[in-house]
Image: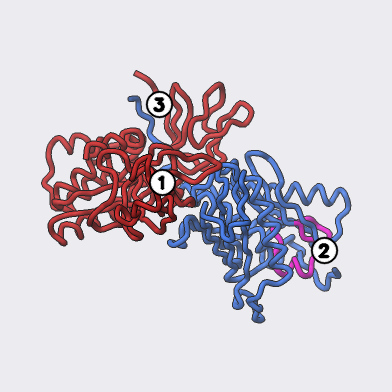
Amino acid sequence: MHDIKRRYVIPGDKIAEGNFRPLMNVIKAGNSLIATRIGIAETGRDGVKVIPLSGVYIPRVNDLVIGKVVDHSSLSWEVDISSCFSAHLPAQDVFGRDFSPARDDMTRHFAVGDMITARIMAFDRTRDPMLTVQDRDLGKIPRGEALKISATRVPRLIGKRGSMIQTIEQATQTRVLIGQNGIVVVTGRTPEGIKLAVRAIKMVEEEAHTANLTQRIKVLLNVPDTPQETSRAPVGSAPKSEQVESTIDEVEEELEVEGEK
Amino acid sequence: MTQTRNLIDANGKRTDGRGIDELREVKITVGSVKNADGSAFIEFGKNKILAAVYGPREVHPKHMAQSDRCVLRCRYHMSPFSTDTRKSPAPSRREVEISKVMRESLEPALILEDYPRAAIDVFVEVLQSDGGSRCAGITAAAVALADAGINMRDLVAACAAGKVDEKIVLDINDTEDKEGGADMPVAYMPRMEQVTLLQLDGRLTPEQFNECIDKAIGGCKMVYEIQKQALMQKYFGNETELKEEVQ
C-alpha cells in the first residue's frame, strides 16, 4: 500500500517541501516543489507530478496520434498533428530502405488530405516530430468522422481501463479511434450512431471535470445501468475522485487501450 | 503635474469614495474567449479588459523563431470606444510601449525554454478604460496564460500605487492619474517575491518611493488572491481541497 497525496494546484503553488523528485509540470525552487500548470498535484514515492487540466498538445516520443497529410516533398509527407510543430513521415518508412523518389509514387500511399494514425518515432527540442506507420493498425484511415477535442481530455474520454470509450462504442455501434493529440475519428454503420457518438464525445470534453460523467453519458446513450458500474461510481461519493483516478491511470494505460483495437 | 483640486477629502476618502489603502473592485472571469487556448476577462474598477492567449503555436514569420526558447508576443490595444473621445484604432506610441513592458513583465514568470521554436501570442484588448489599465491587462494576461496551460514559475499580479495630495495611495484611478502627483505601476510575482515591472510617472522622495513600492506590492498580493480564486473557480468549482484517499 502506498500513499498518494493529491490536491488542486495553480501555477506557482507549493506542492511539497523536501527531497522529492520533480516529475511532470513541477519545478524545484530551493527546497520546495512548485507546480507550473493548473491541475491535480500528486505526491507519491517516486516524486511529485501535476496532471494538467488545460493546454495544447505537445508531442512526445511513442505517442499515438491522428493527423492529416497536408503536403509532401519528394522524400516525406508533412502531417498536421494539431500541435505547434508539423510532423514528418519519411517516405522510407512506407516504401522501405530502397525508396527512390524517381521510381516510387508517393501519392499511391498517402495523398494530401488523407487522415492517418501514426506513432511519434522521434522528437526533441531541435527537430520536428518524425512519424512512423510501421506498426499494427497504423496508417491511413479510410473513412470516418473526425473531430478535435482538447488533448488534456483524452484520458477522460478513454476512461478507467477504457470504460468510457467502450460504453460509447457499444451503445452507438461505432468504432472510435483516439489520438493522443486530441483528434478523434468515429466510424460506424449508421449516421445516427455516429452522430450520437460525436455528441457523447463532445459532452465528455465539455464536462470532463464533473463527477459521475459515465453515468450521464449512459443516460444520453440510453444504456441500462449495470450493477457493477454503479458500484464503481456510487452517486454521492467523493465527487472529484472519479475523474482524478481515471486521469492518472489512463495516461499510462492509454497505449495499451489503443493497441487492443 | 499640478494639482487643481483636492483628491482626498476631509474624511480621508478619495474621489471614488475609497480609502487610501483600498483597491477598486476586481472581478476576473476565466475562459471567456472560446476560440483562444486561454483567456480571461477582468473588471478592475471601471476597466474592462479581455485577454486571450494563443499557443504555443507555430511561429510566423519563421525567421522570428528562437531555437532554444519560445517567443512571447504581446499586443495591448485599446478599442476605439474604450475612451470618452474616440481613440484611433491604430497602435499609438503608448500602446507600443505598454505591449513591450507587458511582455517584459510576463516573461520572467513563463518557462519559455520548455517550448523551443514555438510562439505564444498574448492579446490584451481594452474595452473600457480607467486608470491602471496596464496593470489590469498584465493581471488578466497572467490568468489567461495559466488557463492556456503554459508552464509558469508563478503568476504575475499587477497593481499601481501613487501620490495624491502628498499622500501615498493604492490603486490610482483615472482622475488621480491625471491630476495626482505620481503614478507607479508595479507587477509582482508573489511566490518568488520578484518585481517584474516598475514604472514611475511623477516625482517622489526616497521615503515616498519606498512607501509607494511597498503599498503597490501589497496591492499585488491582494490581486493575486483574486487571480487564484478565479482560476480555482473555473477548474475546480467551489471545491478548493481535494479529498484525500489512500490507494
Q: Horizontal and vertical percent for residue A236?
A: 26, 40
User: Residue A160, relative to residue A30: is it above or below?
Assistant: below
Residue at 36% across / 52% down in the picture? A103
Q: CA distance from mark 3 to mark 1?
A: 43 Å
Q: Which residue is mark 2?
A: B181
Q: Horizontal and vertical percent for residue A200?
A: 24, 54
In the image, taking residue B24 as reference, residue B1 lies left or right, namely right
Q: Which residue is mark 3?
A: A4
Are the residues under badges 3 and 2 in a single subunit? Answer: no
Residue type at numbered disc 1: Pro
Q: Chain of mark 2?
A: B
Foreground tag (3 vs 2): 3
In the image, taking residue A4 as reference, residue B218 lies left or right, namely right
User: Residue A154, relative to residue B99: is it above or below?
Assistant: above
Residue type at numbered disc 3: Ile
Foreground tag (1 vs 2): 1
Q: Which residue is mark 1?
A: A90
Q: Is residue A110 visible?
A: yes
Q: Residues within 10 Å of mark 3 (few under 14, many from 20)?
A: some
The residue range painted magenta reads B166-184
